Image (cartoon, rainbow, N blue to C red):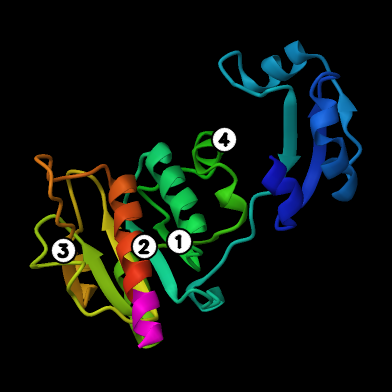
Amino acid sequence: MREALKGGRRKLLALYATETALPRIADLAKAAGLEPRLVDARDLSRHLGEEAVHQGLLLEARPLPEADIADIVSTSGVVLALDQITDPHNVGAILRTACAFGVDALIVTERHSPEFTGVLAKAASGALEHVTIVSVVNLARALDQLRERSYSVVGLDSEGAEPIETIPLAKPLALVLGAEGKGLRRLTRERCDLIARLDLPGPIKSLNVSNACAAALSVAHLRLRDAARD
């Protein structure tokens, strides 16, 4: 919520706060031009559901503006594409990692992707307000569009022929992640210039997709930074 108030990317409609929670958010609300409405905690629970963890605050806002491939602004030179990853906790964690590494955009499919609502936003820890989200009907076509913009498209797969530590990496780069279990779909794999794997030294050779994303972005970030220095 704090990032939504600070981010300026959404149209903010109303802010509800309990008397206890109001001091934590008053300054940000004022800066965002919102007058908080005092409510009872029970009112928030009735509105959100008894299982919701609201911490005494509720912000009503419009969805984030839709974006297209053409709207991606290359700052870091890296984008992520998710091939039908459906778990909102995983996508939220991936968003948080993407934000931490300054990724330019996250590309998801309209179908077989989670809704960008409370559960995902909570897992993203504010990153939803900072990373451009591009929702596409056809991921293979979107990867073609990226290649037309000179992106190198690298798929991450446990069966990849080479480790990501050794394959050629250059900006702009699109890193493609597949769903756990299913991996990258055939048409997605065909659009990748290279399929890479993570080489793990320990006895467990696979990672949760959000952890794999963090590891891959870390490797890519270091290698691209070193390449820029050469």
Secondary-structure class at tag 1: strand
Q: Is residue 229 magenta?
A: yes
In the rendered image, which quarter contains the C terminus? bottom left
Q: Which residue is mark 4?
A: 118
In the rendered image, which quarter contains the N terminus? top right
Q: Which residue is mark 1?
A: 106
Residue 170 % position (x, y)? 32, 81
Q: Earlier in the sequence, mark 3 or mark 1?
A: 1
Taking the image as drawn, is residue 111 in sight? Answer: yes
Q: Earlier in the sequence, mark 2 or mark 4?
A: 2
Task: Measure the C-alpha gap from mark 2 to mark 4.
Answer: 22 Å
Q: Which quadrant of the structure image shows residue 157? A: bottom left
Residue pictured at 68% horizontal, 47% vertical: 3
The local crowd at label 2, few if under 14, some if 14 to 19, many if 20 or more residues have their Cα within 10 Å, is: many
- Labelled pair 3, 1 in contact (Cβ < 8 Å): no
- Labelled pair 1, 2 in contact (Cβ < 8 Å): yes
Q: Is residue 214 magenta?
A: no
Residue 186 % position (x, y)? 15, 63
Q: Is residue 83 above or below residue 152?
A: above
Residue pictured at 31% horizontal, 73% vertical: 223
- Labelled pair 4, 3 in contact (Cβ < 8 Å): no
Task: Read off the magenta span.
Answer: 224-230
The local crowd at label 3, few if under 14, some if 14 to 19, many if 20 or more residues have their Cα within 10 Å, is: few
Residue 5 % position (x, y)? 75, 47
Q: Is residue 149 above or below residue 194?
A: below
Secondary-structure class at tag 3: helix
